[in-house]
Structures are given as structure tokens and as C-alpha cells.
Amino acid sequence: MSKVLVIGAGGVGSVAVHKMAQISKVQPEIFSHISIASRTKAKCDAIAESVRARTGVTVDTYTIDAEDIPALSALIARIGPKLVVNLALPYQDLTIMEACLATGTHYLDTANYEPRDEAKFEYHWQWAYHDRFREKGLMALLGSGFDPGVTSVFTMWLKKHKLKTIRTLDILDCNGGDHGQPFATNFNPEINIREVTAPARHWLNGAWVETPAMTIRENFDFEGVGPKNMYLMYHEELESLARFVPEAERLRFWMTFGDAYIQHLTVLQNVGMTRIDPVIYEGREIIPLQFLKAVLPEPSSLGSTTTGKTNIGNIATGEALDGSGEKTFYINNICDHEDAFHETGNQAVSYTTGVPAMIGAAMMLSGAWSGEGVFNIEQFDPDPFMDMLNRHGLPWQVKELAGPLQF
């Protein structure tokens, strides 16, 4: 039996559970029973009803505060899953890992830990759990989303099949979708805005180079989308890639944003609405960014109005495996927002994270990937993961370019 408990009932959780249910219809040995829990049970119930209507599979639903370790441990013990899939907020990674240790349960997430009081996301907090998981004979898989996740698997696939070494790597994340809103985020607004407003960092010759947020901009013509402005940012897979691709001279991450998004975000920053420190309002403490999240559109509500495509991938340059000198390859996926909504009721940003979460879970539950301790996705054979991407909604393509990016 391969029971799985998903924690988190946002768009990513919805996609992951829908895709798990699809697998369970043909391979019940992988996902023999699916449960989902979050702070708001009504969201879990809505996902369960959609899954039942689309696939006929029953999903159990529960209420849980993922930061309450005793309550979460009790729920895990009650359900008895083989794996907990953490699709909640990054603040909750460590408490969920503690509950998994307490109950002897394997763990998976899509984004690394971030403290509430500082916009700083690094792996060291979770890497510190390696010995505790190893001693319990448990596996924790970190970063099984798209970026981090698929972009890391793309990198390791290139190292296995195309490049002996990687000298430079650029990750390009383009969302060419239009949701019709003046300003909205395609995933959790609090996490999105903290990420975008943090200082940019990239890896260069063995050290981190930090620059002010959203100050380095380039234009790139994305297949299926067209020319878009993209901004240099920090993203957590750069940290793990610097560790697992030690020969890399330069690692960079780019994300596209429209002018309207930048204008709105600039105003919100200027008036203090993106602050994460508490302020006093009518005698009580509030955090401006959390208030802003409450008044912005819920990302999971945007699926029915979003059109266009995403295009996410890697451009890597290095020594070719065949000995033909230095080569550059571009490997990417293009995902259609409307197709994603038709299949799961969610837009493509949720889809491109939820599908890899399901695949990572399937890798663990099927035994294709195994180990004792805390692992990043780069540490496993990329081939079975890449095969499932092609078969479950995120087909990829690879082509050779004339050379690396000229900026």
C-alpha cells in the first residue's frame, strides 16, 4: 500500500492530487489512497469533489494547522501514509519535517524553508536534517516542483546525455499568460512578492554576486510566447546546483514580468505594503504584506480567465560528451494555461509545479528513487523523471544553440 498525504489545498495541491488520482486509476500500487489536509477544509473538499467528478477517485479530506507539530503528527499517525507531500507554505517545511520524523514517514516538498520574519530562503535549515532522517531510515526529497525541480532535472539530464561539464547555466522562467486582472500573482502573493523584492544573486566563479532586486533586465524571444523582458533574480535551485554542479563558473536565474506588474509592485513597495515587519493598525499588529495578500485575487481563482502559455527551461554551455568541443543546449517545456485548466481546473503556473510534485512522489513510492537522509532532486537519475514529464502533461524539447546567451 502506498498511501499519500498532501498538505496544502492551493492550486499546486489541487493539480498534484488530480494527477495522483489519474495515476491511481492505472497504477494503484503507486497511489493506493490519497488524502489532503489544510487549514481550510472547505478548500480540500472542493478539490476532492473535482477529483471525484473528473476521475471517479475518492480523496479523503482533513483540517490541520501544519505548524502544530503534535496535531500534525497525530493526523499522520491516524492516516498512516508512506509519504507526506508538503505543498503548504515554505514557513511550514520544518514543522512538517519534524512531524514526519516523529511518525516515521517519508517527506517531499517543492520549495525550501523560509523564515516568516526574513525574506531569505536557503537550504541549510533543511540540509541540517540529513542525519536525523538517515538515522530513522527515512527519505526527504527537496524541491520537486518546476523551479526548483524540473529545471534541476533538466540540468542533470544534460550532464548525463549531452555535456561532460557545464560551464554556464541560465534558467529562464517565462509566464506569458494573461489573467485579465490589473494586478495579481499566479501563486501565493505573499511568497511571490517576498521572492521578487529580495536582492538578486547569481553564482560567479565560486562566489555569490548580489545586486539590487529587479535592476538587471534583458529581453528574450520565448517560443510560444514572444519577446519578453526578464529580470535577474535569486532562486533556490541556484544554491543546490552550485553544490551538485561544482564545475559551473556561472549560474543565473531569470523571470519575466510585464510592465504593469512592475509598476504596481513599485508603488506597493513605495507605500510600504510589501513590508514583512509588523505595524500597529487600530491598536493591533498587522503585517502589511499579509494584508495585501488578503485583498489580492486568490491565485487558484485565476484559472478560468487565464490564457496564453508558460515557457520554462535551461540554456547550458559546456564540454560536449562526444568530445566535439564546447556546445550549448536549450531544454524547455511550454505549457498552455487553458489546457491546464481544462484538465485540472487550474492555470499553468500551478500545473507546472503540481505535476512535478506528483512525479517526485511517484519516484519515491515506486522505488525508482530511494535513499536515507535529505536529498535534492539533482542527486537522482533524471531519466525516469524526464520520461514521466513527457507522459503526464509536461513534454520537453531540447535543441542545440549556436552559443550561450550574449549577456
Image: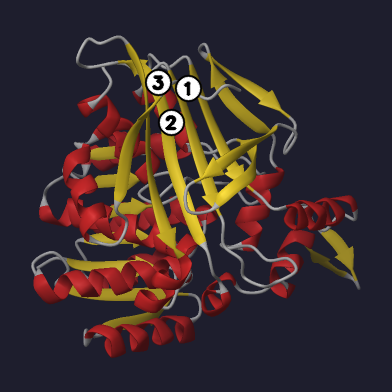
Image quadrant where residue 1 sits? bottom left
Image quadrant where residue 87 sits? bottom left
Q: Which residue is label 2 attached to?
A: 315
Three-letter residue code for mark 2: Ile
Q: Nearer the viewer, residue 366 or 261?
A: 261
Image quadrant where residue 288 sits? bottom right
Q: Residue 291 appears at what percent x and percent y?
A: 75, 68
Examine the rendered structure and indicate whether residue 320 appears above or below residue 22: above
**Do residues under tags 3 and 1 come within 8 Å of each other at their CB atoms?**
yes
Q: Which residue is label 1 attached to?
A: 404
Q: Is residue 291 left or right of residue 124?
A: right
- State whether residue 105 appears in this view: no
Instruction: Give me the residue at 39% from left, 74% from top.
Output: 37
The mark found on residue 317 in the picture is 3
Q: Nearer the viewer, residue 74 or 122?
A: 122
Q: Nearer the viewer, residue 81 or 10?
A: 10
The mark found on residue 213 in the picture is none
